[in-house]
Structures are given as structure tokens and as C-alpha cells.
Image: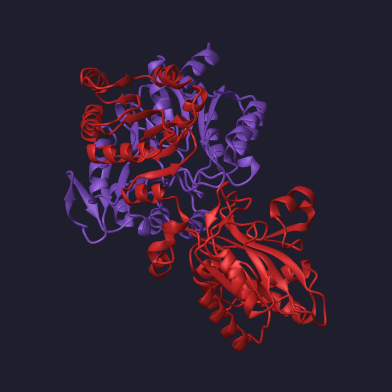
Chain colours: A purple, B red
Amino acid sequence: MSVLVNKDSKVIVQGFTGSEGTFHAGQMIEAGTQVVGGVTPGKGGQSHLERPVFNTVADAVKETGADVSIIFVPPAFAGDAIMEAAEAGIKVIVAITEGIPVKDMITVKEYLADKNCRLIGPNCPGVMTPGGAKVGIMPAFIFNPGRIGIVSKSGTLTYEAVDQITKAGMGQSTAIGIGGDPIIGTSMKEAIELLMNDSETDGIVMIGEIGGQMEAEAAHWIKENGTKPVVGFIAGETAPKGRTMGHAGAIVGGSEDTAQAKKAIMRECGIHVVDSPADIGTKMTEVLA
Amino acid sequence: MNLHEYQGKDILASFGVRVQRGIVASTPDEAVAAAKKLNEETGTSWWVVKAQIHAGGRGKGGGVKLAKSLDDVRSLSEEILGMMLVTPQTSAEGKLVNQVLIAEDVYYPGESETSEIYMSVLLNRNTGRNMIMYSTEGGMDIEEVADKTPELIFTEEIDPKVGLQGFQARKIAFNLGLSGTAFKEMVKFVSSLYKAYDGIDASLFEINPVLKTSDDKILAVDAKVTLDDNGLFRHKDYAELRDKREEDPIDVEAGEAGLNFVNLDGNVGCMVNGAGLAMATMDIIKMAGGNPANFLDVGGTADAARVEKAFRIILQDDNVKAILVNIFGGIVRCDRVAQGIIDAYKNIENISVPIIVRLQGTNAELAKEMIDNSGLEVHSAIALAEAASKVQELVG
């Protein structure tokens, strides 16, 4: 079954004709994703990668029946693009764009509150259901269809986890990159909840980092509602206080933001926490044995 | 992006927030001239000389002093300008003071007692909304207040649909125990402050203290203003306020080369693609018995030019005893990255520390072969665990 995206997902690309959009749309098509078209305002009516280009998301939805959108629009216009997708009735919106101002995301979050849609990201590697659909920028070749769900705030660290799961002889149901910004559409708890309720997922990997309360919130939810083993890792044990580590949201403010504090809470909540990111695959093998 | 106190106050004042007035000076002569001008404009006959550095706790380090005469202004400016100011928020060697703010004295005696208030505006990450945090315990370290008397800290969240409302500003003023003129002043202060926060794409305001003067004015005595870097494209004029002297020169150099770099104190340098993996790599170094010398995200295009620049920046630090390169080649091919590393290594010539290269992803086997056959002093690895044990062998 998987979650969020599958082989039936009809995907459009916002920022389709730009260099990022073009490259990754091509990679998504190659990975077997049903990319049904794209949106670039002013280029409606043209064809790109043998697919139609539309001026608006509403046009694209009307003509193609798209239900998923991936956004490669530059940061200054990305908030607007997310709201346009929501207004047009897109159900799953994946925002890859890095560097959207917090002020814009406050507006976006408020706008989406009463819309029937789910935002993944921004500043994330996207979502991938191997054998179903890739709606993101993850390298498809490291995936293998399987029964482990992966939730992560970061890009290459997600790939690391995916790769270890594959090399350990398992595979992934769905991998969800939730993003590393201070405001994101889908929290770690919500993503884990989706996988916990998925009949084709047997175990979950959660990868967090310093900053914010999201890991603690997810851990407490897992303690109350978890039905599957969860392996966890938190990056940034050695990060100094008060310095942003690459992701806008990765900064230790208070004492609850540290990797140590998060790991302690996760352990208390029954999550199998590894101290080294090299041990994610072997730990999952161990807990599923 | 962090601003100096004087820059933050100028911006707040432009939004109608009452601030303690002051004039910035870079020399003792300028400081005396500033003091004279302030006397003419405000009637103040005492002044506060305040070191302008990007760190809190300046008073504790001797960076904020009261001057009761123009001679005091001169001597205190001479003392503070050029000093290495050490505060609880700086490193042990401190920060060089390039400028002082000459400010009016606002603690003058009068009808009522003065009182200090704490106020900040920031994002509540749990709700995705801005909030105003405030307390009657101004002038103190807010973390200490949160620790000892959390009941004295209040928050007011702002609904983005409608912005800060009047009833919210009144609630804040009531909770702070104000009445009469001071109450009205506070309502205006809070409203203007939030207007400023919203208007300039700020990511933090911390006003500590906000002062109720003896004649019931409400004003900002200090101002810590941080702008959202991602919003700076809308505020080109504020982008020019960046003071690079306040940043680590290596961080600035790396930033100009498009590298995301943070200098740290350890002995093992690292070069990684992706922020999360970079933090995880630092953790691995620590577990292997070393200490990370930096955070460095080379980004998606780890080509020869960027790799070379990254090596040169890491090698500026004499404490670096080894370098761990950790690249997960997803879209980028590992053989191309390997070639970049080999070329960079040859170009730099005198690399005297061992380098461990871990390349995983597309064409990882081929990349390892290229590194192994290059004849360079480079150790290669594919699995992350393997890279970790190589670090341990070298520095653990």
C-alpha cells in the first residue's frame, strides 16, 4: 500500500521548465513516476519532456487529473506556488525549494490549515515509494521495494539510511524527507503516524537533528500508539550551541534542543536509538529478528 | 544575520518604537562629539558608553559604563574602543570592540520608580506562529528566569490572519502591572515593536531591558535584532548592515566560496555533502576518539574547484591532524568526485595530514579504485563504519 505516493499518483512539476525542474522531472520519469505535466506561468500550451506545460496549477489539474505536485520554484515565489497548488485541489504537495523566508511559511501554514491537502517540506529531498513513485530528488538506484518506512529531516543522511536498509537485505515501503526548516508542512510525528498505520510497513527509521521539539513529540506519540519497532538517530551531538548547522532549523537554542536530550527522550519512549549513523541498518535487522 | 545594538535601535525607531537615543562612534573624538550632540538634543548630562559587538552580557565584561562628564566619555571610550571584550557569550579571547554607542542616560530620578521589563519576539516552532515573550524580570538573563521563576514569563501568540490585536497589547501591559501613562505607552510600544518585526523579516527581537522611566515612558534600552537571511532579498538596505568584522574570517571566506562552513575547536577536519550527513559525520569523528574541527557542507556539486577550496579552508587550521571526506553520491557520480579530490590534492601539493575519503553511491567501487591507484596518501572507504574505524586508527 505504501503512503503518500504510489504508482497511481498523477504528478505535476511546478517550476517544470527551469533547470532543476527539468533535470529532476527527467529523473522522476526514469524512476517510473507518472509525471503528467508541469506548470510554468507564461509557458502554458508548450510541451516539455513530451508533457504539457500549463500556466496555472488549476489548468493542470483540470486537464490531467493531477493529485500530487512537486515544487522547484525559487524561494521568493515558492510560498505562493504551494498555496496555488492547495487552492487547485492538489492532495500531496512536495516542496523541494530551500531558503523560503519564515514569514512566507507562516502565511502558507495558516492558508493550508483548512485545506484538504498535505504539504511535505519545504527544504526536503521529497518522498519515494520504490516500485511506485519518486516525487523528489533522491537517487532512485539505492532503493529497493520493501517494508521499512523512513522519516528524516535531512537529504543525504536519508540516503545513508536507505542504502544501509537496502544493503542489509531489506527494502523501503516509503521514505519521507520532511525537511530541515523551522516551519514544515508535515511533522515527524505525522509522518511516523502515516507509516505506523500502513499495513505494508513493518519497521520505521526516524532520523532527526538538533533544534526544535519535533523528535520529542514523535517519541511521545510512539510510546502511546506505536505498534512497530522504530530505530532512531539524532545528528548533531557535537554541534555547538547557538550556531546554525546548515539547515535553518538546526540550531541548539535551549537545553531540550540538544541531540543528547532528544536521544534520552526517544530511549525512554522505547525507540531503538543508535549513537552512530553507521549502525542504522544493522540495528533494524537486529530488532526485526 | 545579526545586527549591532545601534543598528537595531535605528530600525525600531523607524517603526515608531521609542528607544534610548544614542550616536555611534569609532574614535574617542567622535564619542565626545556624540555626547555633546546628545546633550543638545535630549538634555542628558550623563551618558552611557556601550561597546558594540555581537554578543550579550556586555556589561558583565566591562563593555558598558556610565559617564558623568565629557572627560569620562573620552576616557571610557579610550578604554573600551580596541579592547578584547570577554562576556559569557564570547570565546575566552573575547571580541574586538570597533565601535561604541554613546547613549542618553534614561535612569534619571523622578515621580515614580524605574522598572526593567524583558520582551522578545520570536517564532514558536511548535505552532508555526510568532509570539511575544515578556516578563517583569527585565535586565536579567532570561534563561535564568525561566529556570528559577518560570511563572514570571508570559507569552502571547499572534494569529497570522489578523496580526497583533489591541486586546493582546493591553493584556501584555496589564500583566506587566502597568497603569496610567505607562500603560498607554506600553500598548503603543508593543504594537510598534510587532509591526517592526513583521515588516523587516526578523527572526528574533530581544529587548532586555525595556525600561519604564521615572516619568512613565516606555523605551528600549537594548536591542538584539536578528534578521532572517532568507528574507534579505526583500530588504537590500538592511543586507548592507552586515558587519563582517564580527564573524570568523574563515567562515566569511568559505561563505563567499559558496561553502556552508562553521569553524570549531577540534582536530579532525571534515568535508561532507548535505547538512544532516555533515553533522552525523562530526558525531562519527567524536565517537572515533577525535574532535570535529569544523562543519562543512560542500553542497550538491562537489567538483574539483569546490573540493580544492574546501581543502584549503580546512587546512588553514593548524590543529587539523586528519581530514575525513564523506560524500554520498546520489545524483553526483562518485568517480567524478574522486577525480575532483585527486586533482585538488595534486594542486595543493603540500598536504601533510592524512586524508580519509569515503565515497558511497553511484560508481562507488570505481571511485575507490581511482583513489587507491592515485599514489596519494589517501585512505579510501565505502561503508560509513569502515571510514569511522580509519579515523580511529589515525587519531583515536
Side of A126 where B188 appears, left or right: right
Which is nearer the eye, A98 or B318? B318
Q: Position of residue B83 (x, y in %)?
A: 55, 59
Side of B126 where B209 appears, left or right: right
Q: Quadrant of residue A136?
A: top left
Residue at figure coordinates x 27%, y 22% from the top left: B364
Is B326 situated above or below A90? above
> Which residue reaches farthest top?
A289
Is B387 situated above or below B210? above
Residue at figure coordinates x 25%, y 36% from the top left: A27
Query: Is residue B358 visible in this depiction of the protein?
Result: yes
Q: Position of residue B205 (x, y in %)?
A: 58, 62
Q: Quadrant of residue A2?
A: top left
Side of A17 where B202 appears, left or right: right
Total numbered labels placed on residues in the image: 0
Q: Position of residue A24 (x, y in %)?
A: 27, 41
Query: Is residue B15 visible in this depiction of the protein?
Result: no
Residue at figure coordinates x 42%, y 46% from the top left: A91
Side of B344 where B320 appears, left or right: right
Is B234 situated above or below A82? below
Residue at figure coordinates x 32%, y 20% from the top left: B379
Q: Position of residue B48 (x, y in %)?
A: 65, 72
Which is nearer the eye, B325 or B247? B247
